[in-house]
Image (cartoon, rainbow, N blue to C red):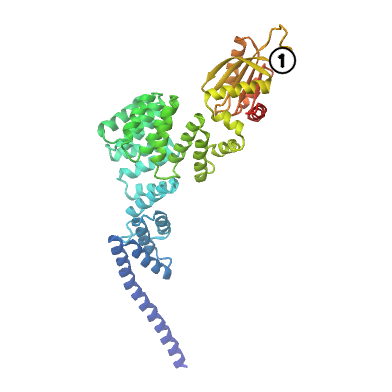
Amino acid sequence: MDNPIQLVIIAILLVGVTFLAVAVIKSLVQPKKLDSIKKLIKNGKYSAAEKIAKAMLAKDPRDYLTHYYLGRAYLADKKNELALMEYKFVAQNAIFDSKIPEKDFRKQLSQLYLKFNQPEEALKEFLLLTKIDPSNAENYYNCGKIYEQKNRADMALGFYQKTIQFNRRHVKAHAAMGLLLFRSKQFAEAKKEIDLAISLSPETYSSYYYLGKILKENKDYPGAVNAFEKALRDPEYRQRALLERGSCYMMANSLDNALSEFDRAVKASKDENSQETLYSRYFLASCYERNRDIDKAIEQWQIIYKHNHSFRDVSAKLSEYKDLQSNDAMKEYLTCSQEEFIEICKKAAMAGFSMAVQKVESKKWGCVMTCTEQKADDWMNVRKQLYLLIFSRDTDAIEDSVIRKFLDQSKEVNCSKAIICTSSGFTSSATGFAENRPIELIGKEKLENILSKAGI
């Protein structure tokens, strides 16, 4: 009886010794392999480091330390998306000690989240960093920036104040605070913060970006353009400053300058998926549309749609203009020169309404015509009624305020009726106002039929 028991005990001991030996060998081998990975990363041999790390993970997929070094290798190799995957695994599984310095790790992870437009995840890391490294002002500043992007001005302001508490000379926090204070109508405090930021460091050009934002919101467009010009010297703010300069020119109705700035903003892009790039393309398309260069506008909308299907009204714009290639008449109406446009409108007046044009006023958005009806009994000496006929190729739907203006104008020149033709449509309030009044609204579909009838 003793022999079998002894054999079992010996077998158990052998198994235990084997496992212990394997563990000891593993504990000796793993650090050596990790050291070799670190050395390869240091020497710039990233592919070799990645290969060793992957081989180790094939044997032990849960080894978070190897995941960490693989992530470091990817990061050094500029394979940021792969680095993020490895770092996420480490964040979820690691026990942080001297082998993985948590402060540096979370700084790197937060930047990766920002790079891949995951501000919520980045915010979690920065909040953790305020606990791990509470005296570092930059962590509070980064929290403030993300809260500001989330339109949480109250939280952003609190974190900017915390930033300044730890670093009274934190220029960017003073500038960001200035903009938030301005938006909350605390004008004196806002100016004080911006002036302080610029006086602390005139060479910190991002401060001029915030100054530009304040001047722009105050409708001082020339001052804003000059401030954004200085902000262009900061590579981080260059694209945003160009975008803002373009919007200033657009608000000041300087369309050619706006188009130039938006084009520069697109060319300054480092990330086609970023909000700055998408907005630059969107406003560039708006400029092309207003200049009636529809093909170029469509090109920009298509690029935006490729990167973000739900960006603003891009899908609706593409749908609105989708028939331009097949509808030559509408394309001609929208894209021809002003002289050609007036001739088209004269033909449309005759074909669609049997009206002869007496007077034409050329407008940026189209034209206004004073017309009389062309009837078979024109040989008779009968006083003819006057009509106000408006053709618009503006890109925005016509508002009720515009309808009121044309109705008043038709009364002033003794017209019995006003007719408004547009390629863009009317707002619901405009349609409601026109009911039971001597004014007729002709939308895109009816206009297309009239142009076809006129042989355009």
Q: Quadrant of residue 373?
A: top right
Image coordinates for residue 330, horizontal then vertical, percent: 60, 31
The three-letter amino acid code for the residue at tag 1 is Lys
As rendered, which of 193 and 409 lies closer to the eye? 409
Give the number of marks.
Answer: 1
As rendered, which of 52 and 302 lies closer to the eye? 302
Image coordinates for residue 322, horizontal then vertical, percent: 59, 38
Q: Which residue is mark 1?
A: 375
Residue drawn at x 34%, y 45% as measured from the top left: 139
Q: Is residue 18 left or right of residue 375?
A: left
Q: Is residue 374 left or right of residue 342?
A: right
Give the crowd class for mark 1: few <14, some 14-19, many >=20 residues within 10 Å: few
Of helix, strand and loop, which one carries label 1? loop
Residue drawn at x 37%, y 39% as measured from the top left: 159
As rendered, which of 430 and 18 lies closer to the eye? 430
Image coordinates for residue 305, horizontal then vertical, percent: 52, 43
